[in-house]
Image (cartoon, rainbow, N blue to C red):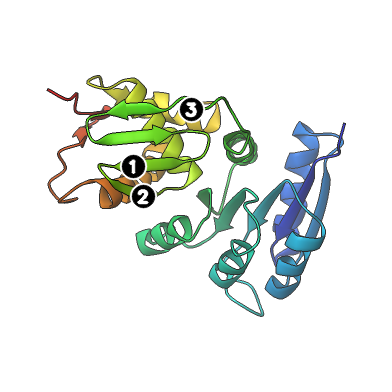
Amino acid sequence: MKTMKILVIEDNPSIVETISLAIEMRWLDAKVVSTAQGEQGIDWAESESPDVIILDLGLPDISGFDVLKHIRLFSDVPILILTVRTDEADIVKGLEWGADDYMTKPFKQLELLARLKGVMRRHRPKAEEPLTCGQLRFEPNSLRLMVGPKETKISRTEGIILEQLMRNSGNVVSYASLAEAMWGLELSAASDSIKVHIHHLRQKIETDPNKPQIILTRPGIGYCIAKPS
């Protein structure tokens, strides 16, 4: 079997060590390569062909956002942002620019492993099963989403959420169920991350995202897609 390779772009040696130890606990044969430089991280993302990238935003040479943007020009590799930045604007920007997940420091090792497992699982191809619900038509494998006659681009994470909602049209999908689909287990901080992804989806499919008619919120429980009448 191919050895899993994980690229860590992080300038704090203690964080790199903590990440490496956590990965060794879960994947004994995984190879961790790391760099403190964003430019080198971009080069290694292309030359090393990692299976997943852990990316810090506060790098000494260039912004982690720039690293993310450059990597997305040539690679669809799963990327997990791991940073001290907790502002919603940064989370939205990171996810909008192509990160698969966003996690803040300090972090728990088991949660990091779960997030990594989740972002890698999302990138595995699966059977194409077009889903339709009202004006929405979604192909989970290709992430092709049609909103009426218009095609809209969505991320893999958004695709997982949308697939769960469409498969359960008319029924509430709980935060716990969405977290299970995304990461393989329920996480205490999952609802905040899910809310950001829901916000993105509404921006892309709702006529008025501030007054959603397609993806409805059930406060304290989760979300549902309104069943076409």
Determine which of the numbered discs, if any, sits on residue 152 in the image.
2
Looking at the rendered structure, the kind of residue marked 2 is Thr
- Report the Cα–Cα distance between label 1 and label 3: 22 Å
Residue reaching furthest bottom? 61
Instruction: Give the mark nearer the N terminus: 1 vs 2.
Output: 1
Q: Quadrant of the N terminus?
A: top right
Residue 166 against residue 198 in the figure, above or below: above
Determine which of the numbered discs, if any, sits on residue 134 in the image.
none
Total labels: the figure holds: 3
Looking at the rendered structure, the kind of residue marked 1 is Met
- Report the Cα–Cα distance between label 2 and label 3: 22 Å
Q: Tell whether 46 sits left or right of 109.
A: right
Q: Tell whether 215 sits left or right of 185.
A: left
Q: Tell whether 106 sits left or right of 175.
A: right
Q: Percent position (x, y) of residue 110? A: 63, 35
Residue at image coords 59%, 41%: 108
Mark 2 in CB contact with mark 3 (< 8 angstroms): no
Q: Percent position (x, y) of residue 195? A: 33, 43
Q: Tell whether 150 sits left or right of 120.
A: left
State the SS at label 2: strand
Q: Nearer the viewer, mark 1 or mark 3?
A: 1
What residue does disc 3 label? 181
State the SS at label 3: helix
Mark 1 in CB contact with mark 3 (< 8 angstroms): no
How dense is the environment of label 3, judged by Cα within 10 Å: few (below 14), some, or many (20 and up)? some
